Image (tube, helix red, strand yellow):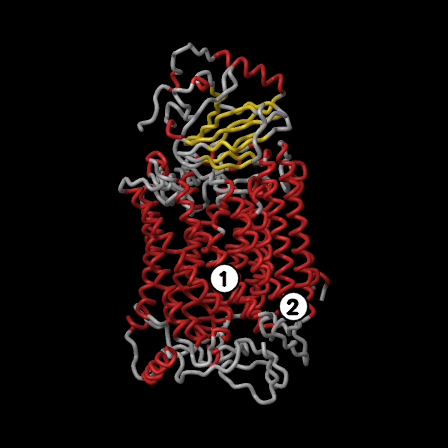
Amino acid sequence: MSFWRSSFARCGLIVAVLLAGLGTCWADPRTSNLWWLPENATEGGVYIDQLIYFILFLTGAVFVLTQAVYIFFIIKYRAKKGVRATYSHGNNRLEIIWTAIPTAIFIGLWGYSNHLWWDVLHSTPPANALQVGVAAYQFGFSFQYPGADGKLGKADANFVSNDNMFGNDPDDPDAKDNFTSSTLEIPVNRAVHIRLDSKDVIHAFYVPQFRVYQDILPGRIIDWVWFTPTKIGKFQLACSQLCGSGHYNMKADIQVVSEADFEKWYQEKAKAVQPQPGAKLSSITETKDQ
Amino acid sequence: MSQTIAHSGAEAHAETVHHHELSFFHKYIWSEDHKTIAIQYLFASFFFLIIGGLLAMGVRYQLAFSGAPIPLIGTLLPKWLVTDAGAIQPQGYNGLVTMHATVMVFLVMMPLLVGVFGNFLIPLKIGAPDMAFPFFNALSFWLFLVSGIILLSSYFAPTGFPAAGWTAYAPLSANGAYNGSQAGQSLWCIGLFLNGLASIAGAVNYITTVINMRAPGMKMFRLPLPVWAIFITSILLLLAVPVLSAAAAMLFFDLNFGTSFFEASHYGQPLLWQHLFWFFGHPEVYILVLPAMGLVSEMLAVFSRKPIFGYKAMVYAMVAIGFLGFIVWGHHMFVSGMNLMLSSTFSLSTMVIAVPSAIKTFNWLGTVWGGSIRFTTPMCFALAFVSMFVIGGLSGIYMASTPVDLFIHHTYFIVAHFHYVIFGGSLFGVFGAIYFWFPKMFGRMMNEFWGKVHFVLSFMFFNLTFFPMHNLGLNGMPRRIADPGLYDFLKSQQPLQIFVSLSAFGLGLSTLIFFVNFFYSMFKGPKAPRNPWNSTTLEWTLPSPPGHGNFPVTPTVYNGPYEYSVPGMDQDFLPQNQPAPKTARLAVH
């Protein structure tokens, strides 16, 4: 029998074809970071990545250990002539050990996660945080910035309507000089505190490089999400909650710029809004039927 | 006492077994024989498996070749699904995603696990003539079939399939103006409602049968693990499914009668839907995996020629999963906008529910340890189940950690995770179980060689399809996006998307080998003996296939279910209905 007809060679051939296929797939990703986490661009993301790596090593170790033992058993205890299986119904001490150890590990992991959840990711945002309103609708996002007073003002889900997408309180003077933008412009290294609301169905605020995901609910204003961008650049906000026929393309651009560039952009935008004392801003005159 | 009553009835029944022939209608259509009903479920699930699989192929085609017309059949498809040129449109894609999941969960996995194996195995394994309520049993099957037809009928509606995801998050699902498929979504509600009735009727039947109709000597702790698993699953079904049925009815009212349970614009609560759905949905996850755990445990014991390692620990772990399964639903909602404190508590309960799964895994390892392993096709699938379940279980820990969920929620990471559990886990378990119980169902053996080919190909293509999805998810690929190429951060993923899709097509094709083997063997396979695998449980003491009424004489049970390789015995298995010979040294455990 020639070499190429042996089963060894055939297996080798199959493996070679598979590797070649994988290799082709590998070539592009090496440059595009396809196989791994996208670069992190927020302060909080650093902690999330650490936690991901921690869980990766933990689960990786468990996986490798259990599979190694399992495969070893499968090979070692394959049926052999004249060898009978061991007659055993189990071992209570082992049961206790392999109940207690995972319980301790899982509760420990919960402690670590929960600490991050409360003390870092959902702690009170710093006082100098930039307030931005985010309104989602079928199928797009709109962003609202506080005017010269630096305050977005009060908002309530009951005020949300086609003409008042951000649910601003029409009687709150703080909201009168707010201005809107179709892109999310934010300064680097300053906390951004977003206030989310939806006009129709559930949408989501998802930016993988920021390690942030939050559903945006109709009928409720969510104001606990904040993050501090650490990298200047262009990012994309994606709606990540199925929201209808246009969901596939519901996105918005995010520009993280230097503090100076942001000030320039902000002043220009704020100047365009000329609040006249006593006059209601046209965008917030109509409120929803109560 | 109930046993006595049930079995005096059984004996009377057994005498009539060979005396009357059933009409064609009562034998094959409205059959009240649990074995026939199991086979009806099996064929119906196969039909839906093919439909669900084709929908998945459509999803994968779109993700790899977005905007390209579907070859051959593209222009034949309805207009809600494809463009004039025959390429899938975004709303059509939403429909494919929605119906793939709905079909696979409600019309394939639940009936395969509970309908087929619950029906076929419970009476045979506990020594009963049939189910407690045979009429209910038949009703349950036909309700299920009607529900499936209703769910799929939306294909013919002008607006097509429901398109709000299988989770049907309101208010998208609650208003035709939002979701663009009023008819499809309404049919979805009706279909799930009827499907729920079928599940509830089935669950009542299984629970009653297991409690009341066990043969003399069949103590609860002598029940084979598949029976335990389906028993616990039935309790979950009975408690969880009514919640879904109620929610589906409310959703139907919102859609069609102007109520406002979930519509925020009229002061309804969108989150209420999620709470109701996941209160059902998380026990549902365990409904989809517990029976497979039971089936796999049995195959591991039979082909390792060993008793199950830690039988009682296995039972307690399943009971624990059953209880805890009802207090973890909020882990689907960490980032839904519900109170952050609830996320903390649900995260803790989720971490805790990982423990019984870990216990089961260690006990499977223990079962294989010291065995005399025979690598039959069912054993290959059972062995693969354990590894795939370990991957699916470990990837669940990422989501259970609230901060990590902030990043990977709703990405392909979760898609990879639940396919590892439900496909690599449950469906592999079902494939193994079909190879294993096929001889008892049809009286013939399936082909081993083609079984192994099916195993190797599906194992390989399964991993090539779903493992890279972890990477796609970690890289930021959201679920349910019809055209990832529109996002800057997803453009570089395209080569991997194509790789995954090609693997998925391979996975789809490998299943054809199974179907050919199955139907060929049904008619041409070698005749099966009573007990081809030298197994201990009661079904193997009967002819293959067993006659109507099952046991001519009610068996008496003397032993636990997995007495393999007992020292002091010549043969390496001790059937449950045979007293142990004096020489046997049975362990007290």
The amino acid sitting under disc 1 is: Leu
Q: Nearer the viewer, residue B390 or B109?
A: B390
Residue B582, percent from left and from top: 58, 89
In the displayed structure, would residue B62 be above or below residue B150?
above
In the displayed structure, would residue A24 be above or below residue A236?
below
Q: Nearer the viewer, residue B430 or B52?
A: B430
SS label for mark 1: helix
User: Which quadrant, please, contains the C terminus of chain B?
Assistant: bottom right
Circle number at residue A93:
2
User: Which quadrant, please, contains the N terminus of chain B?
Assistant: bottom left
The amino acid sitting under disc 2 is: Arg
Residue B200, percent from left and from top: 36, 60
Q: Which residue does the image show at 70% across and 60% down from the upper left?
A: A9
Asked whether residue B358 appears in the rendered view, the answer is yes
The subunit letter for the residue under badge 2 reads: A
Furthest toward the right, the residue is A3
Q: Which residue does the image show at 46% across and 64% down from the upper left?
A: B232
Residue occupied by mark 1: B290
Asked whether residue B68 appears in the rendered view, the answer is no
The quadrant holding residue B157 is top left
Q: Nearer the viewer, residue A218 or B575?
A: A218
In the displayed structure, would residue B36 be above or below residue B513?
below
Taking the image as shown, residue A47 lies to the left or right of residue B223, namely: right
Q: Nearer the viewer, residue B519 or B158?
A: B158
Residue A80, percent from left and from top: 68, 76
SS label for mark 2: helix
Furthest toward the left, the residue is B257
The subunit letter for the residue under badge 1 reads: B
Marks 1 and 2 sit apart, C-alpha to C-alpha, by 25 Å
Q: Residues within 10 Å of mark 2 (few under 14, many from 20)?
A: few
Marks 1, 2: nearer the viewer: 2
Q: Which residue does the image show at 31% across and 64% down from the upper left?
A: B139
